[in-house]
Image (cartoon, helix red, strand yellow):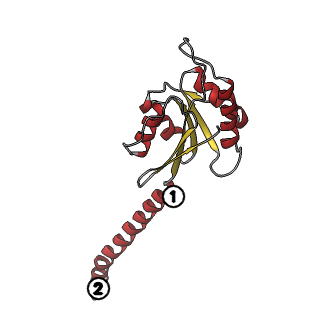
Amino acid sequence: MKKEHAELRRRPLLTPIWLAALIAIVLLAVLAVFVASMTTTTVVLVRHAEKELGTIEDPPLTEAGDQRAQALARTFGDREGAGRIAGIVVSDTRRSQRTAAPLAARLGIQPAVIGASDYDAIIGHIRRDFRGRTVLVVGHSNTIPELARRLSRQPDIPEIPDAEYGTVYVVTVPTLGRPSLLRMNYGS
């Protein structure tokens, strides 16, 4: 009888230890899954290339614009390796689609067409379909800075002047932490 009574006393003493160990294992597994799922999405933002000036609403690219589109394809057209462009988003204008066309052809990517000022749709598409990868967005002088502001959470990004076509914003958006922004130029 004493032996049975001693065994009963030991079991309740071990229960909190086993329960704590089980909780610790579950928490470590959840933490490991969370850390493994952390990524950084890179968004490259460019304005469409030089357009024909005139009276039509959706003008085509100039010869200089076609050359800039080729420069964009050379600059970002690596088919393999780190930083490879995994997706392209363009506005519903001919000039943005033509700017992205040489790069899309080089990479074998069909660009997603989303209205240039539909910021929520563009950002949602990037987060949903390109999480942890690199995506290029071709927009306009007024929409590219606004996308850069929203993605980077930096309010002081200036508009792109009408005569400037080579501005590139590279926004890195980590799962945890603050996004970063790099501004540079391509082509000439």
Residue situated in front as seen by the camera: 2 or 165: 165
**In which image quadrant can residue 94 be found?**
top right
Amino acid at circle 2? Ala
Of the image marks 2 and 1, the number of the one nearer the N terminus:
2
Left or right: 140, with 10 as reference point? right
Left or right: 18, with 81 as reference point? left
* Residue 34 place in picture, x, y as percent: 45, 57
Q: Is residue 47 above or below residue 152?
A: above
Residue situated in front as seen by the camera: 66 or 121: 66
Q: Residue furthest bottom?
A: 2
* Residue 70 place in picture, x, y as percent: 70, 34
* Residue 174 place in picture, x, y as percent: 47, 52
Residue indicated by mark 1? 36
Residue situated in front as seen by the camera: 123 or 101: 101
Residue situated in front as seen by the camera: 70 or 20: 70
At numbered mark 2, what does the secondary structure look like: helix, strand or loop? helix
Q: Is residue 132 above or below residue 2?
A: above
The quadrant of the rendering that contains the N terminus is: bottom left
Amino acid at circle 1? Ala
Q: Residue furthest front?
A: 163
Q: Residue at x 36, y 42 (%)?
A: 155
* Residue 143 place in picture, x, y as percent: 46, 31
Q: Residue furthest top?
A: 55
Identify the disc placed on residue 6: 2
Q: Is residue 97 above or below residue 4?
A: above
At numbered mark 1, what does the secondary structure look like: helix, strand or loop? helix
Residue 52 in view, yes or no: yes
